[in-house]
Image (cartoon, helix red, strand yellow):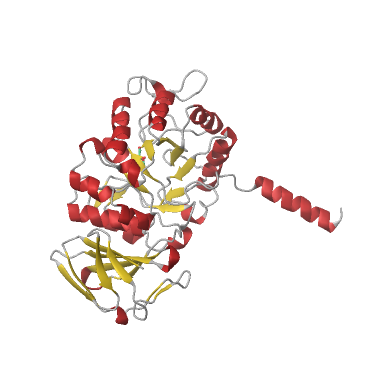
């Protein structure tokens, strides 16, 4: 065979085998709600309908939240005789298709959880050996999002297992956002881009500022443990493929200031914004934080560049994120147990993004400063930035 022909066969072969994840989904970080952080497996049909209603009545839908995802515990303990997954008939008497219809009728999207192993982490039927069958089931229920976990996987290879499920979803034909959840154990950021739309970067989050809680073989991590553990992988995140810092704990017991900082940081990190609180009983302050459109705009910025730590001197975490149109976001988080008096001379700063050469020329040009939680203008970078940041609170600004 002649060389050009061989090359052509190689190219065609390469592209027909190449990645088949659904393209053009999650071009900005997915936004939604997941049942696990608050309810674990104690979920049911009425709860989910109430959450969907709360999306609309609390303005969450209007703020951009879209996916309602049922985590572990939605299934019956056994598959049916044909090996199909079935919804738990007591928790979900109307079945999953009817629930999906309810959610879709409100202009929202529907997500489910399963696991690459033989069983889910809570012991329900996993997808191992049933991937194509389960993908067809999800398509028949109009599922839009699949979170795919990593318990009970024996000697499976992670990249291969997630590829199998990706291909199964593709074969089933309904576009699905594919959420990889192997906790960073196999460094999914290195191989996840062509397979999923987001990947968890750590084990499970806990509703604390900076704690670590042991559970025998694993620990759950507070907000700053997660950030510090995975601040070095920003180059892997971008439109259609995001580092996932886990479902949020906003509204689950930290102070309002800590919730604001947690939310601000998930936005600076371009992490998916998946709420994990009980929206039916959410406090006004929690809803205010979660629906802050100026802050959300930083997360949803079309450039899709994950932010980076600029400095952390004196217990002040300073983070920067380049935005579209040459704008920037910055977050100043006070880690101290007393208020912090910020006095920042822009002329002395050299803020640049080593990944792409973008530079904040605040010392040379006058950027207009907008406070994103205060919803007010704060002058320009022609003058020093002065503000008092409360204990564990955040000053988040946009520079344009
Ligand atoms: C794992 C995941 C969690 C949750 C539970 C469900 O721990 O990391 O987010 O899905 O399983 O059992």
Residue 285 appears at what percent x and percent y?
Answer: 19, 48
In this view, the residue in front, 381 or 143, is: 381
Q: Whole-percent x and y of residue 20? A: 59, 44
The image quadrant of residue 167 is top right
- Image side of residue 172 versus residue 145, left or right: right
Image region (quadrant) for ligand 1: top left
Q: Quadrant of the C terminus?
A: bottom left
Q: Residue furthest left?
A: 338
Residue 211 in view in this figure: no
Residue 123 against residue 349 in the figure, above or below: above
Vertical comparison of 270 with 353: above or below? above
Classify residue 93 by image quadrant.
Answer: top left
Residue beneath the point at 68% across and 49% down: 15
Nearest the eye: 62 or 225? 62
Residue pushed farthest right? 1
Instruction: Identify whether 83 is placed above or below 24.
Output: above
- Based on the displayed image, in which of its 4 quarters is residue 281 positioned? top left
User: Does residue 326 show up?
Assistant: yes
Please name the residue shown 35% across and 30% down the image.
Answer: 73
Residue 201 position within the rendered picture, expressed as x and y whole percent measured from the top left: 40, 53
Q: Residue furthest top?
A: 81
Q: Residue at x 52, y 53 (%)?
A: 191
């Amino acid at each position: 065979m002649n060389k050009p022909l061989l090359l052509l066969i190689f190219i065609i072969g390469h592209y027909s085998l190449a990645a088949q994840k659904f393209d053009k989904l999650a071009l900005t970080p997915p936004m939604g709600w997941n049942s696990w952080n608050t309810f674990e497996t104690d979920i049911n049909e009425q709860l989910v309908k109430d959450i969907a209603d709360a999306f609309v009545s609390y303005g969450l839908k209007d703020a951009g939240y879209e996916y309602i995802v049922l985590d572990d515990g939605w299934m019956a303990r056994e598959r049916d005789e044909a090996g199909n997954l079935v919804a738990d008939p007591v928790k979900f008497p109307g079945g999953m298709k009817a629930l999906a219809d309810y959610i879709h009728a409100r202009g929202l999207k529907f997500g489910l959880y399963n696991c690459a192993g033989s069983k889910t982490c809570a012991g329900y039927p996993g997808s191992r050996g049933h991937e194509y069958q389960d993908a067809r089931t999800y398509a028949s229920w109009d599922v839009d999002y699949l979170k795919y976990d990593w318990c009970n996987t024996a000697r499976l290879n992670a990249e291969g297992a997630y590829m199998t499920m990706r291909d199964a979803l593709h074969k089933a034909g309904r576009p699905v956002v594919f959420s990889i959840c192997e906790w960073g154990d196999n460094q999914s950021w290195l191989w996840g881009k062509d397979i999923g739309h987001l990947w968890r970067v750590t084990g499970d989050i806990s509703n604390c500022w900076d704690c670590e809680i042991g559970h025998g073989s694993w620990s759950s991590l507070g907000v700053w443990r997660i950030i510090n553990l995975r601040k070095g992988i920003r180059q892997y995140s971008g439109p259609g493929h995001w580092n996932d810092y886990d479902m949020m704990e906003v509204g689950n017991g930290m102070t309002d200031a800590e919730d604001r900082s947690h939310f601000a940081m998930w936005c600076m990190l371009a992490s998916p914004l998946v709420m994990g609180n009980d929206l039916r009983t959410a406090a006004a302050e929690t809803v205010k934080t979660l629906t802050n459109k100026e802050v959300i705009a930083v997360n949803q910025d079309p450039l899709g560049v994950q932010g980076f730590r600029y400095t952390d001197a004196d217990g002040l975490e300073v983070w920067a994120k380049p935005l579209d149109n040459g704008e920037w976001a910055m977050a100043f988080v006070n880690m101290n147990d007393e208020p912090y008096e910020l006095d920042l001379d822009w002329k002395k700063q050299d803020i640049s993004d080593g990944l792409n050469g973008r530079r904040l020329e605040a010392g040379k040009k006058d950027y207009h400063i907008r406070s994103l939680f205060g919803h007010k203008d704060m002058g320009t970078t022609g003058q020093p930035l002065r503000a008092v940041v409360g204990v564990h609170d955040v000053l988040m600004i946009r520079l344009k």
